[in-house]
Amino acid sequence: MKLILDACVLYPTVMREVLLGAARAGFFAPLWSERILEEWARAIARNVPEHEPVARGEIAMLALHWPRAKVTVNEAQATRLWLPDANDIHVLAAAVQGHADGIVTMNAKDFPRHILAEEGLSRADPDTLMLGFFEARPDTMRAAADAVLAEARRLSGEDWTMRQLMKKARLPRLGKALTR
């Protein structure tokens, strides 16, 4: 299964790392476009300007670890597409041109299911998607989440619990399942 990761799930960091941990475990193949990655970098530049170089470094690392993930969007073909927010058409275009199965996004209202279905795509919010992966292969997802938790503790110096970290990352249902 191939999934486009919208910029809003690439930033925040913990959400991105959980998603990519699931991808490394073989649950799906991630896809993104140059514009999606640029949106991520610009969001960080707006919110925490001093972290922009770190984000750009992380983007460069994604290219190394996921060389087949980048989709080049043909802007001429994208003109036939429509979404309620015209600024999101590039995400839909990347999904279509990358032959994705779906789009992972937090912006449900901007990606109506009926419009995505016309293109043979689904929409998934990251918490529901990761919870589904956990239910399918709990040990594999637990290992991916444990690695993210260990890295968050190392980088922040804080003693995060799994549930706290997943809640902060807007993955509360996954966090609850991981701590049962």
Image (cartoon, helix red, strand yellow):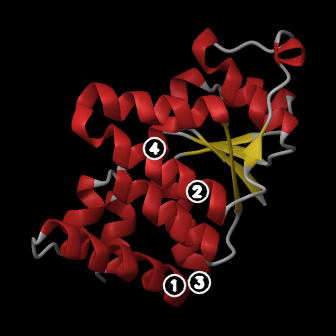
Q: Which mark is residue 138?
A: 1
Q: Which residue is mark 4?
A: 56
Residue closer to the observer: 22 or 65: 65
Mark 2 lies on a secondary structure that is: helix
Q: Is any atom of residue 133 visible in this view?
A: yes
Mark 1 lies on a secondary structure that is: helix
Q: Position of residue 118 (x, y in %)?
A: 85, 27
Residue 129 picture quarter: bottom right
Q: Earlier in the sequence, mark 4 or mark 2?
A: 4
**Distance CA(mark 1)–CA(mark 2):** 25 Å
Three-letter code for the amino acid on which mark 1 is drawn? Pro
Three-letter code for the amino acid on which mark 4 is drawn? Arg
Mark 3 lies on a secondary structure that is: loop
- Mark 4 vs mark 2: in front: 4
Quadrant containing the N terminus is: bottom right
Q: Which mark is residue 161?
A: none
**Distance CA(mark 2)–CA(mark 3):** 25 Å
What residue do we see at 37% from left, 62% from top? Answer: 173
Q: Is residue 146 left or right of residue 159?
A: right
Height in image: 175 above or below 168? below
Quadrant containing the C terminus is: bottom left
Q: Earlier in the sequence, mark 3 or mark 4?
A: 4
**Badge 1, how many Cα within 10 Å: few under 14, some, many 20+?**
some
**Distance CA(mark 3)–CA(mark 4):** 32 Å
Callouts 4 and 1 close, C-beta under 8 Å: no
What residue do we see at 57% from left, 38% from top? Answer: 6
Residue 133 picture quarter: bottom right
Three-letter code for the amino acid on which mark 2 is drawn? Leu
Q: Earlier in the sequence, mark 2 or mark 3?
A: 2
